Image (cartoon, helix red, strand yellow):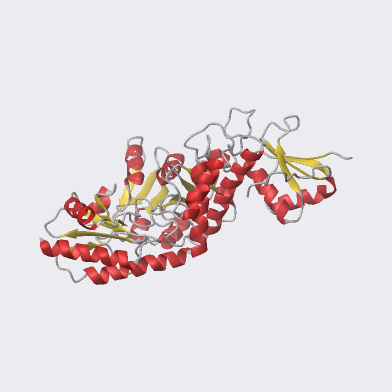
Amino acid sequence: MWKKRGQKEDLSKLEGVVTFFGSHHALMAEKVLKNNGFKAVLIPGPRAISPNCGVALRFAFEAGDQIKLILERNFVTYESIHLYPH
Amino acid sequence: MRLRYFDNAATSWPKPRSVQTAVSEFFRRGGGNPGRSGHVKAIEAGRTVLEARELLARLFNNDDPSHIVFTKNCTEALNLAIFGLLKPGDQVVTTSMEHNSVLRPLKFLEDSGVRVCIAEADSQGRVSPESIAEAVISETALVVVTHASNVCGTITDIESIGRCCRERGVALLVDAAQTAGCVPIDVKQTEVDFLAFSGHKGFLGPQGTGGLYIRDPDRLQPLMRGGTGSLSDREEQPEFLPDRFESGTLNVYGLAGLRAGIAYISKNGVENIQKHDLRLLRILLEELSGESKITLYGPCDGTGQTGVLSLNVQDRSPSEVGEALEKRFGILTRVGLHCAPRAHRTLNTFPHGTVRLSWGIFTTERDVLAVARALKSLAVRH
């Protein structure tokens, strides 16, 4: 359950950000994306793009369209999806 | 002297080792505030809460875990549903077997113009679905029933009552304080609109935990409003679940333990726990039913009852029996009115009350035989 010391996520290819209204939704999103084989990392919510929730989710840009599909298929509420190309 | 704990209907004891470990681990390594930041400790705390929610949703057969909101106990959950739904001019139907956690809020609301109709149970604590149906009128906004009496363990037929409420378009609130974790509950099958539960009884979690399942959040106003970590730029309460009903920091230490408790219950299977409770009930009934000086209350047929048995010993007050059980035999019970005076009137045990034995997952056959022996000896000696 707890991350071991020295174990770090590789964020170099994560270029998309999903914002949420509440943290419950962010945690649900992380779970369903991971269950579907996507790499998703919870990060402090960037205030510049959303004032809503303290947690946002970063994901690989290539997965953009599928992220939306998976969240909607699993009835996970999100605020918006932001894509940042390389 | 070895203590034998027969007060599980008040709070379960002992708790599984995994529950103790989960709480201390959250103290030691967790400690963040769920939903308040994006740092690792806040996220771990959020995961702890989410997993407790998911386990509960699975256990109650509800698809969306956000429809489970946490409170500090079952009483708060009942208050949330009662005060959140009823308005002056509404009528509410409840039963004579309710705990004060239902009757006192309703009594208070009577003064603000809510009409309260109480359906009488029979002398064994059984509430007939017909008596509920008869009490429902066009102004009825809510039916509140206990799933099982905390005094005598009688289980209410919430499936039939749920159907009756659905047919009439009335919301149903079920008080599952005595059954959550001990009796299977399926919110889809029973068409329950609100289900209030305790975390520290059948779920084996720490005290200070409880919650409410909410089918339709639009029917309910929050009991409290405040910080949720979401929509922080607005002064209005968020409308979405679970934040709408969870203002202020949750008891995550408690919920970490509750998560472990529900995991323990789920692993063992609620059906098996119910079978265990009923097996011990039948042993007690067999041992005690022939005793002319011991009066047993409730159905006492070995079914339709939780792991609770209320009794009296002839010519002895409940408190006298309770004291003797503790001092001479190390048996811990609860005596008196059990916060349910109306239920005791229904059972004809008001105002003295009864001696209540309540057991659980860790109670053994040897424990109940020791209780039976102790009671017989108290009855004979008098």
User: The C terminus of chain B is located in which quarter?
Assistant: bottom left
Q: Is residue B307 visible?
A: yes
Name above or below for residue B265 compared with residue B242.
below
- The location of residue B91, given as percent across then percent down, is 38, 45
The answer to whether residue B1 is left or right of residue B70 is left
| Residue found at x 26% / y 60% | B122
Total marks in image: 0
Q: Kindly identify the residue that appears in the image at 73 percent across and 46 percent down.
A: A7
Q: Nearer the viewer, residue B23 or B114?
A: B23
Q: In which quadrant of the rendered view does residue B78 lie?
A: top left
User: Percent from the top left, x then y, of residue B88?
Assistant: 40, 37
Q: Nearer the viewer, residue B65 or B165?
A: B65
Measured as percent of width and height from the top left, residue B271 is found at: 46, 66
Q: Residue at x 36, y 67 (%)?
A: B278
Quarter of the figure with the N terminus of chain B: bottom left
Residue B13 point in image, percent of width and height: 38, 53
Residue projecting furthest to the right? A86
Left or right of B290? Residue B251 is right
Q: Is residue B311 above or below residue B240?
A: below
Front residue (pair B59, A7): A7
Q: Is residue B60 visible?
A: no
Q: Is residue B230 left or right of residue B327?
A: right
